[in-house]
Amino acid sequence: MNELLYLRFSNVDLKRNILTFEAKTTKINRTRYFPINRLAGDVLERRRVFKDLHCPESPWMLCNNSGKRYESPRTSFNKVLKMVGIEGFRIHDLRHRFASWLVSEGGELVKMRDLLAHSSIKMTGRYAHLAPERLHKAIRVLDSFLLIL
């Protein structure tokens, strides 16, 4: 969450669809680059339009009308959850959902580790059980070798 709260417009490259998180804002204390999809790019472009209209001098991606950086998204997040009738969902659950969907669609654990900024593959391995059919598919490649024997 810190990475997003401290994200500056200067660290958003919508042409290349990459966010740059400065080392001082990451848990791993290293600058990291995060690719974004088209939908995220559209949302960030709307934030840029908001900033240009209300607070053009603010460097922050997530800021209020006066350009002050948000300290926490919890209040707004909880308000949206209430509006759509979702209970018992936390901001951090978005991270778990991201990882679960990625692994279910065949995302490689090493790439997931980098996207989630886990310090070890062991932490990312918690999601491996979500796609056992991918392992079956991978092992079936060996069936073609049986034809050679």
Image: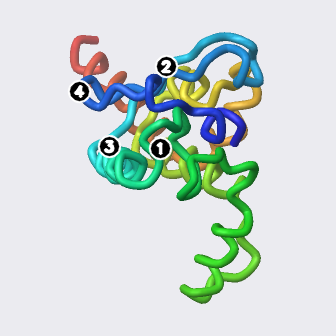
Which residue is pictured at 69% across the width and 21% down the height?
A: 121
Q: Residue 117 placed where, x, y %?
A: 65, 25
- Give me the disc on residue 33: 2
Asked whether the beta carbons under mark 4 and mark 2 sit within 8 Å of each other, the answer is no
Which residue is pictured at 65% across the width and 50% down the height?
A: 96
Residue toward you, 101 or 41: 41
Residue toward you, 1 or 55: 55
Along the polypeptide, which appears first: circle 3 or circle 1?
Answer: 3
Q: Which residue is mark 3?
A: 41
51 lies above or below 122 = below
The alpha-carbon separation of the residues under discs 3 and 1 comes to 18 Å
Which residue is pictured at 28% across the width and 11% down the height?
A: 149
- Give me the disc on residue 102: 1
Q: Is residue 3 left or right of residue 37?
A: right
Mark 1 belongs to which amino acid? Leu
- Give me the disc on residue 15: 4
Classed neighbour count for the residue bearing mark 4: other residues with Cα under 10 Å, few (<14), some (14–19), many (≥20): few
Which residue is pictured at 41% across the width and 39% down the height?
A: 106
Residue toward you, 28 or 134: 28
The alpha-carbon separation of the residues under discs 2 and 3 comes to 15 Å
Along the polypeptide, which appears first: circle 4 or circle 1?
Answer: 4
| Element class at badge 4 | loop
Q: Residue 94 placed where, x, y %?
A: 61, 55
